[in-house]
Amino acid sequence: MKISIQLEAARRGFFLLLFTLLANQLQAQNPVFTRQDTLRGSITPERAWWDLTHYHLDIRVDPTAKTIRGVNTISYKVVQPPKTMQIDLQPPLKIEKVEQNGQALSFQREGNAYFVTLTEAQTPGSTHKVAVFYSGVPQVSKNPPWSGGITWQQDKQGNPFVATSCQGDGASLWWPCKDHMYDEPDSMQISVTVPEALTGVANGRLRKVGQNNDGTRTFHWAVINPINNYGVNINIGDYVTFSEKYRGEKGILDCNYYVLRQDLAKAKKQFKEVPRMLQAFEHWFGPYPFYEDSYKLVQVPYLGMEHQSSVTYGNKFQNGYLGKDLSGSGWGLKFDFIIVHESGHEWFANNITYKDIADMWIHESFTAYSENLFLNYHFGKKASSEYVIGTRKNIKNDIPIIDYYHVNNSGSGDMYYKGANMLHTLRQVVNNDEKWRAMLRGLNKEFYHQTVTSAQIENYLSKKIGRDLSTFFQQYLRDVRIPQLEYQFRDNKLAYRWNNCVTGFNLPVKVLLNQQEKWLEPTTTWQEMENIPANTTVQVDTNFYVTVAPSKGQ
């Protein structure tokens, strides 16, 4: 009797565990989104009626108390009959007051969103400003830059070493804004007040430094190009600076470097990577997109981030990714990963920016791919191929690269190296390097300083290649399977088709038949090639991110 009771208890425990595992798996596959996710990730009616034109973010940072206080003056144009205005700011920071022309406005808070009631007439076509005052102790990043917030550290001499990072979690972690990627200001001013012994570095060009009467200095920075919210940053430290002028496609590009005093010698040696990066990327992608705002590389107490015209760096002045080669090919140690990758985002993230984070592949796939294009430019095509193929070991194929829209939800981390290998495969289909280069440069010209959707990028590439790529992108962006070239021999013929793929998948592929190159145009239905003996070896060119196998029905 006791044994049967124990068996029954074990049986129930097993089914409870199974139910829990299945429930957790179902929840992982179908996450539950809240109203806060919608307010953060969608173009709400309270956002849609006004077009953002300019920010002036004026803040004071106290590294000792780890607090921020300031005001963001938001300039905008009315495009539709107005609603209330949504301004975003995440706790523990709080909006203290909102003013328009000196008049206080009422507002209500719902989680991270504040809804402001406007009293002045908001006629379509008219322009206005609101001033948003805020303060508090901002969220501390637990794992920068992958978790958003402020990093409060000290350098080896005990000086404050402070930086912001907020991609994904939102710029509203540390300043009040219209926190959705679809609408960028045409320009921005950033004034950051810090203790007078420190330097405050932000985006764009330094216009002036003001000495205050309370032992602080204010650094005034100006950005004259459109800028996305998460690309805005501030960095504070005992910085020293050096600079150089790069002769690029649009003339002279000012390159300015801010590093901790203790690391100046190492930085002057390692940052020689910057001109090499600019040479490669201007060749492949076209002119650096922000000549007017200059290029900066700024040392920070975390790994690095693609802040616009203020790329942040924490790779410890060494090649690779913290000294490691992510590809295992050896080529990853030929360049400084953070300088190359994060600067590549100036073209794909800051110049061309996703409207919805679900399309984050536009940023990360092209930029991960830029790593092997850097190698292509400086070390040749073989090196670049070996590198990108080597990164396939980092691909999980767990969830689709493109996930849910309108809820601030990005898809799988495969957007990096699966995305890079998708683009490398597409390069093989083009089969003409100059045409491929022209397409990449054309992307940055066609969508210059714009926010875009995946559909726009997909349609552009289809048009320029001259073939319908809809099933190609469906396969690699919205499915987790890797296409398999299935083959069998029939009466001195080679039969082949695509398997393990979406309906209608029709990627052309280069194969080796007894080491002789042949191009095939497989579809999802069987096709045949005559005069191919049954002992022929069938291999796929490894530059294609596909698999190959004999048919199980053979």
Image: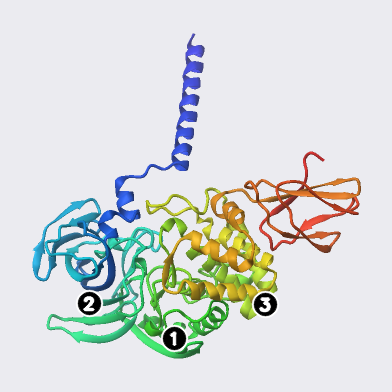
Nearest to the observer: residue 56 or residue 276: 56
Residue 319 visible to the viewer: no
Farthest left residue?
103
Depth order, front residue of 444/409: 444
- Separation of marks 1 and 2 at Cα, in angstroms: 25 Å
**Residue 217 falls in image quadrant:** bottom left
Amino acid type at mark 3: Gly
Q: Furthest residue to the top?
A: 1
Residue at 61% from the left image edge and 75% from the top image edge: 437
Q: Which residue is mark 2?
A: 194
Cα distance between the residues tagged 2 and 3: 46 Å
* Residue 100 in view, yes or no: yes
Q: Front-most of 391 and 119?
A: 119
Q: Earlier in the sequence, mark 1 or mark 2?
A: 2
Spatial CA span between label 1 and label 3 = 31 Å
Contact, CB < 8 Å: mark 2 with mark 3? Answer: no
Q: Kindly identify the amino acid type of the residue bearing the numbered disc 2.
A: Val
Determine the residue positioned at 69% across, 73% down: 432
Q: Which mark is residue 265?
A: 1
Q: Earlier in the sequence, mark 2 or mark 3?
A: 2
Q: Quadrant of the C terminus?
A: top right
First along the sequence among labels 1 and 3: 1
As drawn, the label of residue 380 is 3
Of tags 1 and 3, the one toward the viewer is 3
Check the image and report above or below for 8 versus 396. above
